[in-house]
Amino acid sequence: MTVYAVNVQTLQSQVHVALGALIQSSVVKWGELTIVVTAADYIPTVLALRDHPDCRFEQLIDLCGVDYSTYKDEPQVGLRFCVVLHLLSVSLNQRIRLKVFASDDEAPVLSSVCEIWSAANWFEREAFDLYGIVFEGHDDLRRILTDYGFIGHPFRKDFPLSGHVEMRYDAEQKRVVYQPVTIEPREITPRIIREENYGGLPQAQ
């Protein structure tokens, strides 16, 4: 049996009925529905999105962190760290984007949704590794992309481009060592090549 996608405005109405006052904001843009909820309402929201008969979002397609501290080169307005989920209903052929902001910029914490969608496991580890967002209830919350000796969270907007530590092989110790970064920050200005016959190719006349 073919299942046809529901109109996005109809989906918006159905989600509003399913979630009610849990929704902080709801926007349809580029043909997709995005809703925002508070950290306190995060788990009740995802349970309703999974279980309500008009929603039935059985699959978590993606989960990622966002640092809004310098979003679009404008001063920060509101909370800094956000987690964005993309959900799919296979049975109803519809999609939704859910955004939830951690309530504390200094120590961002949200509940884990691994018990609701097992696919969240590595996604939450990635958001923890890159943004420092802690997911309470996650059974194995440890770094997944950076090295064991890595310091900080590299996708935060205030993380230095050169990092905090560097890794190199020490021939005397015969092992890899970590040390503070010794690279001097510098601005690289592209050089415009004007030499004739550069690369052996004749210049256009």
Image: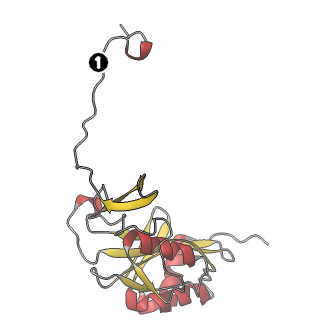
Task: Between residue 27 and residue 107, name the one nearer to us.
Answer: 107
Q: Secondary structure at mark 1?
A: loop
Q: Position of residue 191 (x, y in %)?
A: 27, 29
Compare residues 171 and 10 and report the one nearer the observer. 171
The reply, left or right, for residue 109 in relation to residue 54 is: left
**Which amino acid, mark 1?**
Arg
Q: Quadrant of the N terminus?
A: bottom right
Tell me what residue is drawn at x 65 percent, y 72 percent.
Answer: 93
Q: Quadrant of residue 40?
A: bottom left
* Quarter of the picture holding the C terminus: top left
Q: Measured from the top left, where is residue 169 in percent x and y?
A: 43, 54
Q: Residue at x 43, y 12 (%)?
A: 200
Residue closest to the eye, 191 or 114: 191
**Residue 97 in view (yes/no):** no
Q: Residue furthest top?
A: 205
Which residue does the image show at 20% across and 66% down from the upper left?
75
The residue lying furthest to the right in this view is: 1
Residue wearing tag 1: 194
